Amino acid sequence: MGIGILLYHPLLAWSLSIILSVINNDNLRQWNGKKKTMPKKQNELQPLPPAPLVLLDRDGVINEDVGSPGIISVSQLRLTPNAGRAIGRLKRYGCSVVMVTNQSSVGKGLLNLNELNTIQQRVQELLWEQDEDATFDRIYQCTSDDPNHPRRKPNPGMVQEALQDFGRHIGASSSSSTSTIASCDHRRRTYMVGDTSTDLQAAAASGGVDYRILVSTGYGRTLMTRKGYPLDIQYHHDDPNGRVEYPVMDPVWIHEVVGIFPNIHPSTVPFLYCQNLEQAIEYILEQEKEQTSTRSSAGVVVP
């Protein structure tokens, strides 16, 4: 009976409820081993501005392309200029950033999945060395070497998976008709950054990517060569040893490729042509910040 009295004593019950409350609240603050601030109460939450989804190809965009058969060893990895810092800026702005990459070396038997995962982890580590915020929200990879595989770019399977996972609408094949973001468009926008025509084709065929960006690193500069001359004709050496040349250029919108750039599929236009990932992300952030300002001045709130 003495034990029963203790269990039902009001003061003891109150103390026990406080202890359980502290334990539960501490669990709420834990996420991947890191302390997080307590979630705000519902009536304290403020509407957030639209956060873009940015899809990035890997080889030739995030890290330098090494040619066929692709990266098969971590020793081959080298980031394009300031890739980590640029991705970190996207994350701090509130963007979702995902990798969408063909990795057919696995399908060809040159790598196994464990080896590919080791390479992917090393890419992430190299990005973190530049910026601790440069973390991918998700990685989509197609390891098949079958060109007809629905997930393998230029097919849109992987891109559509990303769009669905991040709550984007998938409609007809997307094709932006202006070189800037329309001020009346208040949706959460999606960008695809690649270095090949297949990257842009997958984005165009997905029915949900608003803006396609081609970078001159990787295969981009070769694609943008006409009559023996690349679109960009000035260079500088980013590598102190002069090992790699990068074009000096301003972003330019391409609205026509037929008869001009024969290795780029007509479905990809319009697209923005940029020097590298850093410049592409700079453009994305400038446009998004401009639109955030426009929406604020117009009193537009996007849930």
Image: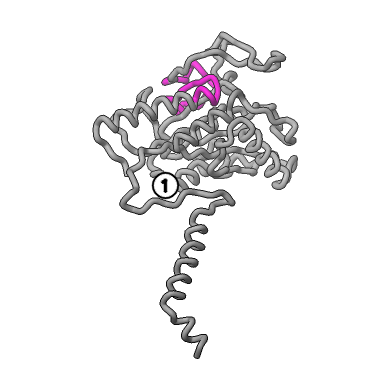
Say which of 265 and 40 sits in front. Answer: 40
**Residue at 56% over, 29% down:** 85
Q: Was residue 237 drawn as part of the magenta stretch in this picture?
A: no
Q: Quadrant of residue 139?
A: top right
Q: The magenta stretch spans which residues?
A: 255-280
The image position of residue 254, as x and y in percent, is: 44, 20
Query: Tag 1's secondary structure?
Result: loop
**Residue at 68% over, 28% down:** 78
Q: Residue furthest left?
A: 298
Q: Is residue 297 visible?
A: yes
Q: Quadrant of residue 270?
A: top left
Q: Is residue 107 visible?
A: no
- Disc 1: which residue: 167
Q: Was residue 276 drawn as part of the magenta stretch in this picture?
A: yes
The image position of residue 232, as x and y in percent, is: 54, 12
Give the quadrant of the C terminus.
top left
Q: Amino acid at mark 1?
A: Gly
Circle 1 crowding by C-alpha within 10 Å: few under 14, some 14–19, many from 20: few
Q: Looking at the image, is 214 positioned above or below residue 301?
A: above
Say which of 95 and 168 sits in front. Answer: 95
The image position of residue 141, as x and y in percent, is: 60, 42
Say which of 241 and 113 sits in front. Answer: 241
Q: With 303 as the anchor, is 252 left or right in this view?
A: right
